[in-house]
């Protein structure tokens, strides 16, 4: 399942880049797929349903930003491929990550979490008859924000 999720995440991210920037790079397929799989794994195994979706999304955005930073240091700064450069944006770190994109990654993480949940749930519904050993899955449900009290 994770290989399929990697391929879906990579393809969707490159399409998003093409739609927004008009160009992409093959490394973004790998980075997008990796982010999708990691966020899905955390959502699947570490985050309980009780954890608010926005909390999960902020954690997901941190993961995306950290991976983007290390990927950028390798492919942009070390290899000199110049795939992206945020140095003209405020609150950037070495031109590889910035606050503006971190906020966008929160929205992207929400989409990743919801899509991952529904893909896994759909997989369960489609194959539970032939794979009775699969654990029973709950239908995805979310709480956007959790009250402090």
Image (cartoon, rainbow, N blue to C red):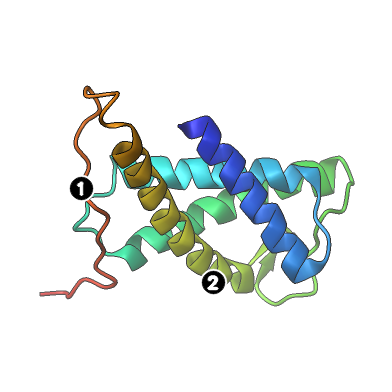
Q: Considering the numbered disc 2 on the image, is that residue within a helix, a strand or a loop?
A: helix
Q: Residue 107: where, in percent of width, then height?
A: 50, 69
> From what the image shows, is residue 91 above or below residue 53?
below
Which of the pair 29/75 is nearer the observer? 29
Q: 26 left or right of 142?
A: right
> From what the image shows, is residue 119 above or below residue 140?
above
Which of the pair 91/27 is nearer the observer? 27
Q: Residue at x 24, y 60 (%)?
A: 141
Q: Residue at x 64, y 45 (%)?
A: 10
Question: Gap in Å between the C-alphas at discs 2 and 1?
Answer: 29 Å
Q: Which mark lies nearer to you, 2 or 1?
A: 1
Q: Residue 50: where, in percent of width, then height?
A: 19, 58
The circle drawn on residue 138 is: 1
Which of the pair 64/98 is nearer the observer? 64
Crowding at mark 2 (Cα within 10 Å: few <14, some 14-19, many 20+): some
Q: Residue at x 75, y 43 (%)?
A: 27
Which of the pair 79/147 is nearer the observer? 147
Q: Which residue is mark 2?
A: 103
Q: Quadrant of the C terminus?
A: bottom left
Q: Quadrant of the N terminus?
A: top left
Q: 136 left or right of 1?
A: left
Q: Considering the numbered disc 1 on the image, is that residue within a helix, a strand or a loop?
A: loop
Q: Residue at x 57, y 70 (%)?
A: 104
User: Which badge, 2 or 1, is on the more N-terminal residue?
Assistant: 2
Residue furthest out toward the left: 149
């Amino acid at each position: 399942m994770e290989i399929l999720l990697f391929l879906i995440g990579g393809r969707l991210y490159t399409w998003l880049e093409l739609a927004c920037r008009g160009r992409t790079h093959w490394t973004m397929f790998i980075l997008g797929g990796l982010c999708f799989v990691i966020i899905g794994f955390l959502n699947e195994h570490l985050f309980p349903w009780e954890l608010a979706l926005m909390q999960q999304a902020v954690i997901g955005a941190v993961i995306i930003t950290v991976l983007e930073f290390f990927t950028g240091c390798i492919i942009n700064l070390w290899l000199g491929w110049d795939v992206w450069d945020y140095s003209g944006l405020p609150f950037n770190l070495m031109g590889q990550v910035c606050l503006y994109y971190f906020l966008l990654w929160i929205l992207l993480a929400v989409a990743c979490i919801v899509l991952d949940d529904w893909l896994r749930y759909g997989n369960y519904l489609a194959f539970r008859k032939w794979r009775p050993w699969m654990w029973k899955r709950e239908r995805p449900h979310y709480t956007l924000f959790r009250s402090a009290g």
